[in-house]
Amino acid sequence: MNLTETALPASRSRWAAAALVALAALAGCREQPPAGSPVPTGNQAAVSALQAINASAHECWIRSKDPAFAGLRLIPELDTQYGRPRLLLLRKNSTQGLPVLVIEAYGNPARVETYGPLAATPLGNRIGNDVRRWSAGTRTCAA
Protein backbone atom coordinates (compact mmCIF):
# COMPACT_ATOMS: atom_id res chain seq x y z
CA MET A 1 0.00 0.00 0.00
CA ASN A 2 1.39 3.40 -0.90
CA LEU A 3 0.99 6.71 0.93
CA THR A 4 -1.72 8.17 -1.34
CA GLU A 5 -4.06 5.22 -0.78
CA THR A 6 -4.06 5.73 3.00
CA ALA A 7 -4.16 9.55 2.88
CA LEU A 8 -7.15 9.78 0.51
CA PRO A 9 -9.83 8.44 2.88
CA ALA A 10 -8.62 10.68 5.72
CA SER A 11 -8.77 13.79 3.53
CA ARG A 12 -12.28 12.85 2.37
CA SER A 13 -13.49 12.45 5.94
CA ARG A 14 -11.95 15.82 6.90
CA TRP A 15 -13.65 17.44 3.89
CA ALA A 16 -16.98 15.84 4.79
CA ALA A 17 -16.65 17.00 8.40
CA ALA A 18 -15.85 20.55 7.26
CA ALA A 19 -18.85 20.51 4.92
CA LEU A 20 -21.15 19.39 7.75
CA VAL A 21 -19.85 22.14 10.02
CA ALA A 22 -20.41 24.73 7.27
CA LEU A 23 -23.98 23.48 6.67
CA ALA A 24 -24.74 23.59 10.39
CA ALA A 25 -23.40 27.15 10.58
CA LEU A 26 -25.57 28.23 7.64
CA ALA A 27 -28.64 26.63 9.20
CA GLY A 28 -27.98 28.55 12.40
CA CYS A 29 -27.93 31.86 10.49
CA ARG A 30 -31.68 31.82 9.88
CA GLU A 31 -33.60 34.13 12.13
CA GLN A 32 -36.01 32.08 14.19
CA PRO A 33 -38.59 33.30 16.68
CA PRO A 34 -38.30 32.20 20.30
CA ALA A 35 -39.94 28.88 21.07
CA GLY A 36 -43.67 29.16 21.68
CA SER A 37 -44.07 32.56 20.03
CA PRO A 38 -46.27 32.99 16.96
CA VAL A 39 -44.47 33.36 13.65
CA PRO A 40 -44.94 36.94 12.46
CA THR A 41 -46.05 36.76 8.85
CA GLY A 42 -47.45 40.23 8.17
CA ASN A 43 -49.90 38.50 5.87
CA GLN A 44 -52.71 37.75 8.34
CA ALA A 45 -55.26 40.07 6.69
CA ALA A 46 -54.38 38.73 3.25
CA VAL A 47 -54.57 35.12 4.40
CA SER A 48 -57.94 35.73 6.08
CA ALA A 49 -59.32 37.29 2.91
CA LEU A 50 -58.06 34.40 0.79
CA GLN A 51 -59.47 31.82 3.21
CA ALA A 52 -62.92 33.35 2.75
CA ILE A 53 -62.50 33.50 -1.02
CA ASN A 54 -61.20 29.92 -1.09
CA ALA A 55 -64.22 28.61 0.84
CA SER A 56 -66.70 30.42 -1.39
CA ALA A 57 -64.87 29.56 -4.62
CA HIS A 58 -64.82 25.87 -3.71
CA GLU A 59 -68.51 25.97 -2.87
CA CYS A 60 -69.66 28.09 -5.80
CA TRP A 61 -67.27 27.13 -8.58
CA ILE A 62 -65.95 23.64 -7.87
CA ARG A 63 -68.41 21.68 -5.69
CA SER A 64 -71.45 23.11 -7.47
CA LYS A 65 -70.18 21.53 -10.71
CA ASP A 66 -70.47 24.90 -12.44
CA PRO A 67 -69.78 24.17 -16.14
CA ALA A 68 -67.64 27.31 -16.44
CA PHE A 69 -65.17 25.75 -14.00
CA ALA A 70 -65.40 22.12 -15.15
CA GLY A 71 -61.96 20.67 -15.60
CA LEU A 72 -60.38 23.07 -13.12
CA ARG A 73 -59.15 22.70 -9.54
CA LEU A 74 -58.44 25.31 -6.90
CA ILE A 75 -55.17 25.07 -4.95
CA PRO A 76 -54.58 27.37 -1.95
CA GLU A 77 -51.03 28.55 -1.24
CA LEU A 78 -51.73 30.42 1.99
CA ASP A 79 -48.87 29.31 4.23
CA THR A 80 -46.03 31.34 2.81
CA GLN A 81 -43.24 33.16 4.60
CA TYR A 82 -41.93 34.65 1.37
CA GLY A 83 -44.08 36.30 -1.23
CA ARG A 84 -47.81 36.78 -1.19
CA PRO A 85 -50.42 34.19 -0.26
CA ARG A 86 -52.49 33.13 -3.26
CA LEU A 87 -55.05 30.78 -4.73
CA LEU A 88 -54.25 28.99 -7.99
CA LEU A 89 -56.83 27.73 -10.46
CA LEU A 90 -55.27 24.92 -12.50
CA ARG A 91 -56.46 22.42 -15.07
CA LYS A 92 -57.46 19.15 -13.36
CA ASN A 93 -55.45 16.96 -15.71
CA SER A 94 -52.31 19.07 -15.40
CA THR A 95 -49.95 18.01 -12.61
CA GLN A 96 -47.54 20.79 -13.53
CA GLY A 97 -47.65 23.97 -15.48
CA LEU A 98 -48.89 27.48 -15.11
CA PRO A 99 -52.21 28.30 -13.46
CA VAL A 100 -55.05 29.64 -15.60
CA LEU A 101 -55.93 32.08 -12.81
CA VAL A 102 -54.14 33.49 -9.76
CA ILE A 103 -55.96 35.21 -6.90
CA GLU A 104 -53.40 36.99 -4.74
CA ALA A 105 -53.79 39.11 -1.62
CA TYR A 106 -51.48 41.50 0.23
CA GLY A 107 -51.50 44.33 2.74
CA ASN A 108 -53.58 45.31 5.74
CA PRO A 109 -56.40 45.87 4.97
CA ALA A 110 -56.08 43.14 2.38
CA ARG A 111 -56.03 44.04 -1.29
CA VAL A 112 -56.94 41.24 -3.67
CA GLU A 113 -55.75 40.91 -7.28
CA THR A 114 -56.69 38.39 -9.95
CA TYR A 115 -54.63 37.72 -13.05
CA GLY A 116 -53.85 35.02 -15.57
CA PRO A 117 -55.22 33.85 -18.91
CA LEU A 118 -58.70 33.12 -17.55
CA ALA A 119 -59.03 36.69 -16.27
CA ALA A 120 -58.73 37.96 -19.85
CA THR A 121 -61.73 35.90 -21.05
CA PRO A 122 -65.44 36.78 -20.76
CA LEU A 123 -65.45 34.62 -17.60
CA GLY A 124 -62.94 37.08 -16.10
CA ASN A 125 -65.70 39.62 -15.37
CA ARG A 126 -67.69 37.05 -13.42
CA ILE A 127 -64.58 35.92 -11.54
CA GLY A 128 -63.73 39.53 -10.65
CA ASN A 129 -67.27 40.19 -9.41
CA ASP A 130 -67.31 36.98 -7.36
CA VAL A 131 -63.92 37.71 -5.78
CA ARG A 132 -64.87 41.31 -4.93
CA ARG A 133 -68.14 40.15 -3.36
CA TRP A 134 -66.44 37.41 -1.34
CA SER A 135 -63.64 39.79 -0.28
CA ALA A 136 -66.29 42.16 1.08
CA GLY A 137 -67.73 39.38 3.25
CA THR A 138 -70.71 38.25 1.17
CA ARG A 139 -70.67 34.47 0.84
CA THR A 140 -73.38 34.00 -1.78
CA CYS A 141 -72.64 32.27 -5.05
CA ALA A 142 -74.66 34.60 -7.26
CA ALA A 143 -74.50 38.39 -7.41
Image: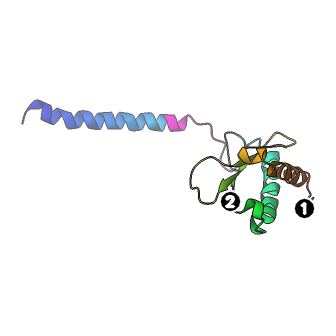
Q: Residue furthest left?
A: 1
What is the three-letter code of the residue carrying label 2? Answer: Arg
Q: Is residue 100 left or right of residue 51?
A: left
The stretch drawn in magenta includes residue 35? yes
| Residue identified by numbered label 2 | 73
Residue that label 1 marks: 142
Would you say residue 104 is visible in this rendering?
A: no
Residue 33 shown in magenta:
yes
Q: Nearer the viewer, residue 40 or 44?
A: 44
Q: For the N terminus, give its image quadrant.
A: top left
Residue at screen point 78% across, 49% down: 47
Residue 7 sits in which quadrant? top left
Label 1: element kind: loop
The quadrant in which residue 64 appears is bottom right
Distance, label 1 to label 2, CA atoms, is 20 Å
Left or right: 102 with respect to 30?
A: right
Which mark, by number, is residue 61? none
Residue 81 position (above or below residue 11): below
Which residue: 58% across, 36% down?
30
Horizontal and vertical percent position of residue 56: 82, 61
Dominant SS type (magenta): loop
- Magenta-colored span: 26-39
The residue closer to the viewer here, 46 or 140, is 140
Q: Give the residue type at disc 1.
A: Ala
Which of marks 2 and 1 precedes in the sequence?
Answer: 2
* Relative image position of residue 2 (x, y in whole percent): 7, 32
- Residue at x-position 82% and y-position 46%: 45
